[in-house]
Image: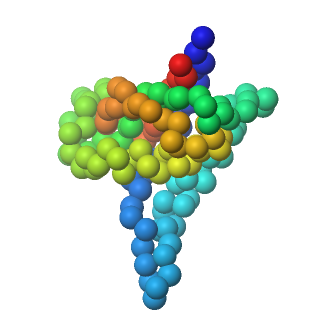
Amino acid sequence: MYKEIELYFEIRPTPHQSVRTAKGIFFQPKKIMDFKKDIAALAKKRLPADFKPWGRDVPVILLINYYFRYRKSEKKENIGAMIPKITKPDVTDNLNKAFVDALAGIVFEVDQQIYGIRAFKYWYHKDAIHAKFKTL
């Protein structure tokens, strides 16, 4: 029997940038750290109070959609409709990195548990992330 959790985050999707270095010190940009903290806080708030992260032995499938603000050039009659996004960022891996890192230890113990990502899509709508987590 499998388990499923569906989470919706009203937050702007933020791609994970490479670790930066300054004077020999490695660091994450503040924007990425803030995004991860916000995702973690929202997840804790939306999960049931008694929820425990799925153990390391539980494989997880992630079904995810990222929603971005409409382009400024979008026709007014299209506002409100979900329109597929085919512009930057096209860095699937970078969008997933920050999101998955933020949820490690909250929904699942470690990110190595995610063995599949399905139904990955970009849309124009409102800034948000919609994710379903399924176990086997």
Q: Is residue 49 left or right of residue 15?
A: right
Residue 136 appears in the rendering: yes
Count of residue discs? 0
Q: Is residue 24 above or below residue 5?
A: below
As drawn, which residue projects farthest toward the right? Answer: 50
The x, y position of residue 62, in whole percent, is 46, 30
Quadrant assignment, res 49: top right
For residue 120, side relative to residue 97 (left or right)? left
Q: Quadrant of the N terminus?
A: top right
114 to 41, vertically: above or below: above
Where residue 105 appears, x then y in whole percent?
65, 44
- The residue lying at 49 percent from left, 67 percent from top is 28
Q: Quick one: 130 or 17, which is closer to the camera? A: 17
Q: Is residue 116 left or right of residue 2?
A: left
Q: Please, which colouring scheme is shown?
A: rainbow
Q: Residue 108: give x, y in percent of width and height.
A: 61, 37
Residue that lies at the very extreme toward the front in this rendered image: 57
Q: Residue at x 53, y 43 (%)?
A: 111
Residue 46 visible, this angle: no
Q: Is residue 115 above or below residue 89?
A: above
| Front residue (pair 135, 78) | 135
Q: Residue furthest bottom?
A: 23
Q: Residue sitting at 45 percent across and 88 percent down?
A: 23
| Residue at 36% in and 42% down | 68
